[in-house]
Image: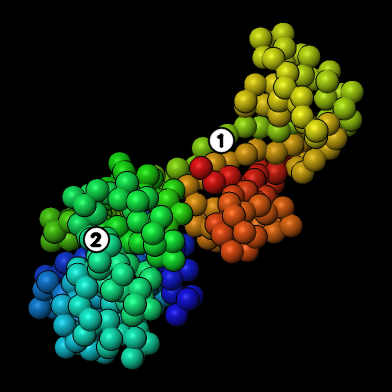
Amino acid sequence: MADIYDTFRDIGIIPVVAIEDASKAADLAHALVKGGLPASEVTFRTACAAEAIEAMIKAEPNMLVGAGTVLNVEQAEKAVKAGAKFIVSPGYNPDVVDWCIKNKVPTMPGISNPSEITACINKGVTHLKLFPAERKGGYKIIDDFGGPFPQCTFMPTGGVTTENVGEYAKRKNILCMGGTWMVKKPLIEGEKWDEITQICKDAVKAMHNFHIDHMGINAKNEAEAKEIAAQFELFGFASKFGNSSIFASEQVEIMKENGRGTHGHISMVCNNVERALAFLKPYGFNPVMETAKWTGKENASPLKVVYLDKEVGGFAIHLKRA
């Protein structure tokens, strides 16, 4: 069951779908996958939810498809029979939670306060849906929950958009984000598949928020590094000396000896290193784990920094958590 929660984290955004016509489910699945979001929480707000789940899985077998707005055990049973891989509820229903635990079905009950979180923890459930997220305080309340409930991770849903998804994505205790903004009813009914795909791509870009922190230049030795730094001083950049490098401004680092990369390295900031690694893997990038640094305990906390094994233009890339 732990693997599916890793998949939630890696995908990052779970589209929350209310579909009125199951015949549109296959095309919707293709559009989401093409946009970089191979997942869907199909809500039981419509009569054809189970049929839509079946259709999406048939169209995209590797897609993570589950059921949302599950209010009772009967709906949970119907969803799983249709192929749902997970169950999400807008609130905490002990009957649904107990059924999911008994049948080993991953579930994320909805919570909005500490009492509901405590009830879930007492059931052994620690991956939770915050709903409605923005109305309840958004990422700020999730920051507050992190103190008394460090064992929990959250899927905020309700009010999450392309504009604020990055702020959610950088939180350590946020597993993923849920949202409807890429699958609004007019888009589905109008069969705006290309538009849905583009909204997904924009959301993925905002979620990662890749941007360059600084560039590292390799020098053969300390003397050459000082010479390079002196030339940058001509442009008004003061040199800041460290043990292994010299910083000529915050954006340029000169290595005192040849480091990683043919010419040097580029420090690439992202909101979540693990999620970025999952995104980059299909493009041939993999982590060099001996370079990894963690935000806390090694191998038991989120990654802070790690180099990639593939150079770009002669520069090594290291990912850095925002």
Q: Is residue 280 left or right of residue 257?
A: left
Which residue is at 65% across, 60% downward?
298
Q: Is residue 34 visible?
A: no
Provide residue 5's location: percent of width, then percent of height: 43, 71
What mark, if any, has residue 212 been given in the picture?
1
Viewer-closest of 170 and 308: 170
Determine the image quadrant of residue 216.
top right
Which residue is at 77% across, 24% downward?
241
**Residue flagged by tag 1: what amino acid is it?**
Ile
**Callout 1: few (<14), some (14-19), or many (20+) C-alpha neighbours within 10 Å?**
some
**Disc 1 vs disc 2: which is toward the camera?**
2
Determine the image quadrant of residue 117.
bottom left
What mark, if any, has residue 278 been given in the picture?
none
Q: Is residue 194 left or right of residue 74?
A: right
Which residue is at 85% across, 35% downward?
257
Provide residue 176's location: percent of width, then percent of height: 38, 60
> What residue is disc 2 on?
113
Location of the N terminus (image quadrant)? bottom left
Number of marks in the rendered image: 2
Q: Which of marks 2 and 1 precedes in the sequence?
A: 2
Provide residue 272's location: percent of width, then percent of height: 49, 52
Q: Secondary structure at mark 2?
A: loop
Q: Secondary structure at mark 1?
A: strand
Which residue is at 23% across, 81% downward?
94
Q: Is residue 229 above or below residue 154?
A: above
Q: Is residue 248 left or right of residue 98?
A: right
Provide residue 54's location: percent of width, then percent of height: 26, 82
**Residue flagged by tag 2: what amino acid is it?**
Asn
